[in-house]
Image (spheres, coloured by chain):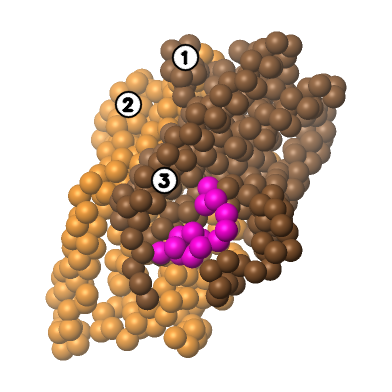
Chain colours: A orange, B brown
Amino acid sequence: MASGHTEGRRSGGSLDSLRHHTRLYFRLLGAQVRSQGAYRTSFLLDSLGTLLITAAEFAALALVLPRFGSLSGWTLGEVCLLYGLAELAFVLMDILFGGFDAPNLSGHVRSGSFSTFLLRPGPLPLQVFASDFALRRVARVVLAAAIAGYGLTHAGLSLNAETALLLLSSVLGMIAFFGALFVVGGTLTFWTVDSVEAMNVLTYGGRTLISYPMDIYGRALRRTFTFIIPAAFLSYFPVLRVLGRPLPDGLPDWAALLPLPVGLLALSAALSFFRFGVRHYQGTGT
Amino acid sequence: MTIHLPPVPQRHAGAAGSGAALYAAVARLGFRRPFAYPQAALWGVVTNAFFGLLRVSVLAALFGVRPQVAGYSVTDAVTYTALTQAFIVALALFGWTDFMRTIHRGEVGTDLLRPMNLLGFWAAQDAGRAAAQFVLRGLPMLLIFQVGAAFTGGGLHWPAGPLAWTQTILSAALAWACGFLFRFLVNCAAFWSPDAAGFGRFAWALLGLGCGFLMPLAFFPAWAQAALACTPFPSMLNTTVELWLGLRSGPGAWVALGTQLAWTAALLALTAFTLRRGLRRLEVAGG
């Protein structure tokens, strides 16, 4: 899959190597796209099924909410904004970081193909990044964007540069943050596969948690996900700010501007952990 | 898995003498298997409890100060969440692809050599698996919710009286049967398609919405409820929850059970027919 002529180019300038690695990444993706497109009908059904998972979950909420009027004071449009942003970021993260997801990486570790990655002449993280690109998820991106778009137009907020920038940094922060959780979960499988379920609580649980306004949770739960696991900074606080509402727990207004730093901090810590894991990786003897 | 060399397995057929004992043995083995992975069950309970907490929060926020919506009180809504979280693994609400895999790998050929009906063999195995998962994950989940609700001064809604218990248990058994036949039918797609997983994903998403796993069906608008009433999906979970909560009682309870039975019979006929057609075109590569 990887091109064999990579060794000699490593020593080039950093810009050159960046260009080269970007090309290598897209090459690897291209190979996966081609293989997934081989069975047209099967691919279409698969995309539709993936799409329907999100659609069903969202429909359950959207069908029920009008009957109740609001979700603890949040209208359907406002909930859509939170829900759509979280879903959009999570799907994009899944497309980008899917290779690190524990079931995928532990599959490579157990089958021995992870050892193959180590032998190949490309950077290791880049190969893992490109090892599970599921094209079918692209359909979900469209749906998530549509839900977020409905929220943007129905939440009664003023669309200006600051709002746009804040929401963009929220999405990027979430991608980095949940990507970090995927990297940590994947790295843990170097030692044990039992951790997979536990990580699901943080990844899929975290996504579900931040898809709804966090004032619906008990104070203990909300504070845990603010001060111990800083998930509230990712989208809840920025959305509160664009809606012109105060932050809870006496937090200052500028705390709503932190999604990107929080996400990047988590991601850089997770990547260090991955490097630590690789140094202690012993292979399975396959 | 053991491979019986002679075409007629000597021990089972000889010692048992009847088919029923054979199916019972398969069900017993299916029951024992999940107990081999206690750690998986433990983490499963933790995960389900956490998601249960999030779902209860959403439902409670929806209720706000309303005491009752569509026949559900807040206690009912908490009980609904506890029940659906308790049944996830037992009723395989996130999907099931075991039979599909045996078709793709050709293992179905070995299964056909057994002196049993293929559908009956899988039904027995899945019944055992479902019972074990209910004991391992379902009962602890109900206990956790009962204790958690007690802390906030409430409790779960339990079936009232022996008749309600009997009807609920009957309904749970029918929900399993109906759901199993639907899952098996979806898995049969593997006879026709080299990649039935996508078809499965589509079907499991429909199941989650239609059976009332994501939200109680009573909360849906009338048109959505009417549309779902024409499908077997409510029989796979929602009916059991409504019987448990006493939302259907008296003659209504018997009508609900009759509907479940009718859908089970219809799915059985359809699944058996599809399986026969599928087996006719099956070709197992030699090795």
Mark 2 or 1, closer to the camera? 1
Mark 1, secondary structure of its residue: helix
Residue A120, located in which quarter of the rendered image? bottom left
Which residue appears farthest toward the right when viewing the image? B161
Q: Chain of mark 3?
A: B
Question: Pointers 2 and 1 in contact (CB under 8 A)?
Answer: no
Residue at x 23%, y 46% (from the top left corner): A41
Callout 1 environment at 10 Å: few (<14), some (14 to 19), or many (20+)?
few
Could you tell me how far apart the alpha carbons at marks 2 and 1 are, in whole angstroms? Answer: 27 Å
Q: Is residue B149 left or right of residue A54?
A: right
State which mark lies toward you, 3 or 1.
3
Residue stretch rendered in magenta on the structure: B106-119
| Residue highlighted by disc 1 | B226
Q: Amino acid at mark 2?
A: Tyr
Between B171 and A224, which is closer to the camera in this rendering?
Answer: B171
Q: Are marks 3 and 1 on the same chain?
A: yes
| Residue lying at 69% horizontally and 22% vertically, measured from the top left | B243
Disc assigned to residue A150 = 2
Q: Amino acid at mark 3?
A: Arg
Which residue lies at the image location 57% right of the left edge and 54% below the top edge? Answer: B116
For the point 44% across and 86% down, the residue is A286
Q: Chain of mark 2?
A: A
Residue A211 in percent (x, y) is at 48, 37
The residue type indicated by label 1 comes to Ala
- In the rendering, which numbered label is found on residue B276? 3
Q: CA distance from mark 3 to mark 1?
A: 33 Å
Measured as percent of width and height from the top left, residue A70 is found at 51, 18
Please tell me which of labels 3 and 1 falls first in the chain. 1
Packing grade of label 3 (10 A; few <14, some 14-19, many >=20) is few
Among the 4 quarters of the image, the one containing residue B38: bottom right
Q: Nearer the viewer, residue B242 or A230?
A: B242
Q: Position of residue A207 (x, y in %)?
A: 48, 45
